Amino acid sequence: MYNSCMETVEFLLKFCLILLSAKVLAEGFSFAGLPGVIGEVVAGIIIGPSLLGLIGHQDVFVLLANIGLLFLLFNVGLETDVRHLFSVGGQSALVAITGVTLPLVFGFAACRYLFGLPGIVSMFIGGTLVATSIGITVRVLRDLNVHRTHAAQVVLGAAIMDDVIGVAVLAVLMGYQSEGIRVLPSLSVLAFITLFLLTAPSLGPHLRKGLTRLDSIAKTPGIVLIAVVSFLFITSAIAHRLGAPEIIGAFGAGIALAGVPLFGKKRERTEEGSASLEKVEKSIGPIGELFIPVFFVMVGVSIDLNQIDFGSSHFWTFALALTFIAVITKVASGIWVKGGLGVKATAGAAMVPRGEVGLVFALAGLKQGIFDAPMYASVVFVVAATTLLAPFLIKATAKKHG
């Protein structure tokens, strides 16, 4: 009982440290005119193993971070006009394909032919550069209040595709290690995601009507909150069971509750429907504000700078070359977005951060024995550099084109 009590107290204090450090640094960065999300990631670097070592990569905080990411994508789904998202699907597909192909090809070529690394190592590093952290991208676009723009919608669609393709690439590479590449499961996942996002909007009116009915007959408070959170978690779990990332389920849940019809005439939302949606946003908002910062702090905690030999010239040559490739190939993907050069640059910059997705690739390479410790540290540095650099690029380009 004593040990259990001490573990509880330790968890509470660490959780409090995560929340306070995230808020203080986010406020500090915001006052300095910088994206608050950078402050939250830097908070994780400071309190994590890189500096103070107060917070580690404990399972409980990873779980809380994943919950925060689900709430973030759920909120994005609520605010997404699914018609517009599908109307820019062609542009999103081109951005995603370019943003996958260029980093993979140039990352592999640089590692294989410039640095003489083995083929599988080069492929894994190229695969790491494929990823785009939709969490980082969405948060920065929201902080800058440009998340409803045409370019942002294209980026959102492309980032979702990137996430799916990234999972497929990782599965293929892991399968290659076990001498069994499986293409069909990846195609079935893509088919499920497309079908889910196509049918989700039609559920909106029925879901909101049900929530209104529940709220009217409930004798205890919180029924709408419990119903919405349950729906969010169930759709996320279904997506995971079908082989898709959980965030696809969370995003689809938000789209479903928003209820913007994909086909037919776009109807104005009824007063009852608007009130129901407002109640959903109002009830679930504080929970998101509590858990979403945990996700970004844990991204920083995942970056252990102590593993890097900053005195090695080889490290700097290798890491900077990969960072340059990681940035320039993603920025180039924005060329397909309609608009001026500034719009294209903003869209491309929004595809730059690797964040937690890149760390998953790096960790998989380490566990598979493909990366040794120095190589893993170098890849983590590239992930960290793109994660921290991207918000500055997005803000600079967004501000330039208004």
Image: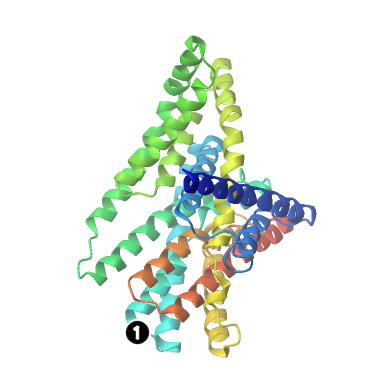
Q: Is residue 239 above or below residue 297?
A: above
In the foreground, 207 or 335: 207
Please state which amino acid type lies under the numbered disc 1.
Answer: Pro
Residue 328's image quarter? bottom right
Give 94 or 41, whichever is nearer the viewer.
41
State the residue in front, 373 or 207.
373
Eyeballing the image, is 197 above or below 27? Answer: above
> How many marks overall?
1
Residue at far front of view: 2
Q: Looking at the image, which residue is at 55% across and 58% down? A: 299
Against 290, residue 389 (above or below) is below
Mark 1, secondary structure of its residue = loop
Residue 197 placement, left or right of 140: left
Q: Residue furthest right?
A: 31
Question: From where the camera sits, is residue 270 visible?
Answer: yes
How far across and down, in percent of the image, does residue 33 sit? 77, 55
Residue 262 location in percent, x, y? 44, 33
In the image, taking residue 148 as reference, residue 132 lies left or right, namely left
User: Percent position (x, y) of residue 74?
Assistant: 50, 39
**Vertical placement of 361 versus 223: above or below?**
below
Where is residue 211 drawn, in percent x and y? 47, 19
* Viewer-proximal residue among 366 and 257: 366
Quick check: can you spot residue 266? no
Q: Residue at x 54, y 43 (%)?
A: 72
Give the image quarter of residue 239: top left
Left/right placement of residue 295 relative to residue 198 reads: right
For disc 1, the marked residue is 118
Does residue 231 appear to the left or right of 81 in the view shown?
left
Question: Pointer 1: residues within 10 angstroms few (<14), some, or many (20+)?
Answer: few
Q: Say which residue appears at 37% left-offset and 33% top-offset.
A: 199
Q: How is the image coloured?
A: rainbow
